[in-house]
Image: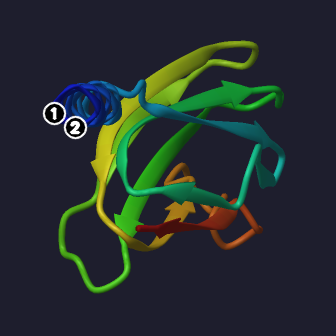
Amino acid sequence: MKLLAAAFLAAASVTAAHAATRPPARLQVVAREYSYTLSRLTLKAGPALIELDNFGEDRHDLRVQRAGARHVAGLGEIAPGSRATLALDLPPGRYSFWCSVADHRARGMRATLTVSR
């Protein structure tokens, strides 16, 4: 019985260690004139890599803000055919994504991501 309990505790420790070292979630944001397409609409809270891929003909950037927060994260302008990656730790919430170049946001370059627990 003690051996079984020890084996269970060892397995639980390995599982907890694996969860703590899980790789970051990945999200692709495709930019075109004048839209963003997200590879998924929801992510689990925690570390994330957000890749901006510019498939358009103009330069684009990416701004990210959680609803109710002041801080705005983002990537600078990237050229057509380029990509850039932003590493963030995302707490649960709704996130707005937009392009801040010229009037791109007003023309529809925005999207929403939901991050759950």
Say left or right for 112 vs 66. right
Question: Label 1 to label 2, Cα distance in Å?
Answer: 5 Å
Q: Pointer 2: residues within 10 angstroms few (<14), some, or many (20+)?
A: few
Q: Nearer the viewer, residue 28 or 98?
A: 28
For mark 2, what is the residue? 5
For badge 2, the amino acid type reads Ala
Asked whether the residues under the numbered discs 1 and 2 touch, taking CB atoms below 8 Å apart as contact, a structural biologist would say yes
For mark 1, what is the residue? 2
Numbered mark located on residue 37 in the image: none
Q: Residue at x 73, y 19 (%)?
A: 80
Using the image, determine if residue 94 lies above or below residue 24.
Answer: below
Secondary element type, mark 1: helix
Nearer the observer: mark 1 or 2; the answer is: 1
Q: Residue at x 69, y 26 (%)?
A: 53
Q: Position of residue 69 (x, y in %)?
A: 23, 77
Say left or right for 11 vs 100. left
Q: Position of residue 17 (x, y in %)?
A: 23, 27
Q: Nearer the viewer, residue 52 or 6?
A: 6
Secondary element type, mark 2: helix
